[in-house]
């Protein structure tokens, strides 16, 4: 599913397009999307398609289109310290972005039907923590994934502030998901071809809002015809952080503050190349064609007007470019991970430095 915005050349280009099309509307969601390179969640042989606004599926691995994930992230209204449950957590891409917003005192759990996908998600998560410089810019709530059918969660499981389901939900399963919400919590779920935001306003009251027309593959239901009782899914326990772990959180936080106060001028904004404008297009619906989800869209008068304005602006830009001399671009200097350098400079044993760095390799 997807195709709502123009294809990007890299992750930043994709996010620029999502912003321009108003799928990403808040700064915290933008920062999370920029920190996690979507291409890192693709198999290498498919990475060239990572920055298109399209869904991707290979065997049990699946990623929704970027425009869908951005709508989900905005609809969840995330903030630090909340608890989050991802039903059908897949590659862990969404859960990892959510963890950047929840911070170290949040809860971040995922349930995924396929064991091989859970293993893949754990590998991608470990790679992000150990190798991505983006990791050191955030206080992270690490996702915990379990294997199981999200329709068989134990009835005594704890409730969550935010829940997302990444598969189509039938009406008779709607209440099952709503009950897992705390009062004041938000559930984002595809129901009857609509991505829907459900807010629990009281013990037995909810408010619903349709966000976007979509078509998701349905939730897999356990076959009870053979008389065997399905395995009950036990969600990860909610642990209180150890004193050692809390020390790491606060030491890193203090170092971050020192760096920001001492050298704000060193936080250099990277060079921004001129980008092709994208048209703001909304998808009316999505349909299955074989194993592919294909967007179906009808051009509106508003879209035609926007397209005409873009063409006129492009012509003006071309005229300005012809009238000015080309300035050679300076080679961009590699960005420095200031937090890592600060930790490595501390007069501490190497083992403690490694712990403060989360045993990072980069």
Image (cartoon, rainbow, N blue to C red):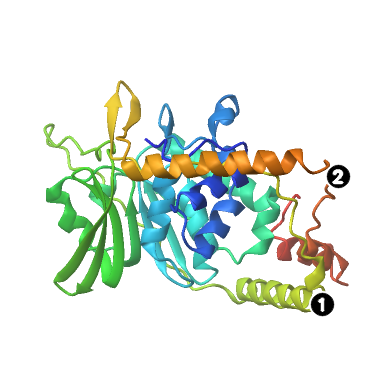
**From what the image shows, is residue 231 above or below residue 101?**
above
Instruction: Specify whether residue 98 is in view.
Output: yes
* Circle 1 residues within 10 Å: few <14, some 14–19, many ≥20: few
Give the quarter of the image for residue 30. Answer: bottom right
Q: Nearer the viewer, residue 239 or 24?
A: 24
Find residue 116 and report its horizontal and vertical position in percent. Answer: 45, 35
Judged by depth in the image, the label closer to the viewer, 2 or 1, is: 2
**From what the image shows, is residue 95 above or below residue 57?**
below
Find residue 55 and report its horizontal and vertical position in percent. Answer: 42, 35
Q: Residue at x 40, y 31 (%)?
A: 60
Q: Residue at x 34, y 54 (%)?
A: 164
Q: Residue at x 62, y 64 (%)?
A: 138
**From what the image shows, is residue 245 above or below residue 24?**
below
Name the mark on residue 252.
none
Q: Residue at x 61, y 77 (%)?
A: 243
Give the quarter of the image for residue 225. Answer: top left
Q: Quadrant of the N terminus?
A: top left
Q: Secondary structure at mark 1?
A: helix
Instruction: Specify whether residue 275 is in view.
Output: no
Residue at mark 1: 262
Residue at mark 2: 331
Q: Residue furthest top?
A: 290
* Circle 2 residues within 10 Å: few <14, some 14–19, many ≥20: few
């Amino acid at each position: 599913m997807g195709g709502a915005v123009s294809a990007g050349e890299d992750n930043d280009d994709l996010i620029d397009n999502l912003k321009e099309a108003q799928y990403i509307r808040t700064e915290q969601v933008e920062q999370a999307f920029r920190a996690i390179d979507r291409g890192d969640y693709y198999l290498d042989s498919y990475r060239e398609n990572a920055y298109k606004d399209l869904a991707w599926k290979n065997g049990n691995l699946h990623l929704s289109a970027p425009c869908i994930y951005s709508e989900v992230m905005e609809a969840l209204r995330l903030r630090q310290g909340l608890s989050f449950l991802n039903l059908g957590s897949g590659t862990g891409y969404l859960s990892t972005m959510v963890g950047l917003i929840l911070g170290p005192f949040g809860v971040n759990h995922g349930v995924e039907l396929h064991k091989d996908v859970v293993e893949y998600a754990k590998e991608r998560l470990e790679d992000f923590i150990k190798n991505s410089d983006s990791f050191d810019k955030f206080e992270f709530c690490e996702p915990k994934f379990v294997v199981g059918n999200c329709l068989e969660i134990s009835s005594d499981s704890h409730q969550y502030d935010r829940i997302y389901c990444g598969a189509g939900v039938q009406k008779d399963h709607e209440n099952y998901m709503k009950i897992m919400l705390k009062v004041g919590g938000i559930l984002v779920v595809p129901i009857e071809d609509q991505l829907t935001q459900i807010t629990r306003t009281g013990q037995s009251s909810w408010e619903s809002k349709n966000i976007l027309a979509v078509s998701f593959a349905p939730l897999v239901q356990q076959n009870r015809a053979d008389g065997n009782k399905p395995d009950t899914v036990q969600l990860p326990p909610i642990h209180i952080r150890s004193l050692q772990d809390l020390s790491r959180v606060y030491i890193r936080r203090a170092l971050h503050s020192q760096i920001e106060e001492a050298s704000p001028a060193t936080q250099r904004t990277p060079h921004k190349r001129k980008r092709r404008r994208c048209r703001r297009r909304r998808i009316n619906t999505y349909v299955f064609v074989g194993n592919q989800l294909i967007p179906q869209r009808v051009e509106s008068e508003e879209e035609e007007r926007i397209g005409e304005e873009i063409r006129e602006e492009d012509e003006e830009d071309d005229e300005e470019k012809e009238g000015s001399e080309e300035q050679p671009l300076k080679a961009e200097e590699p960005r420095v991970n200031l937090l890592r350098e600060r930790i490595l400079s501390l007069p501490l044993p190497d083992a403690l430095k490694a712990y403060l760095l989360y045993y990072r390799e980069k």
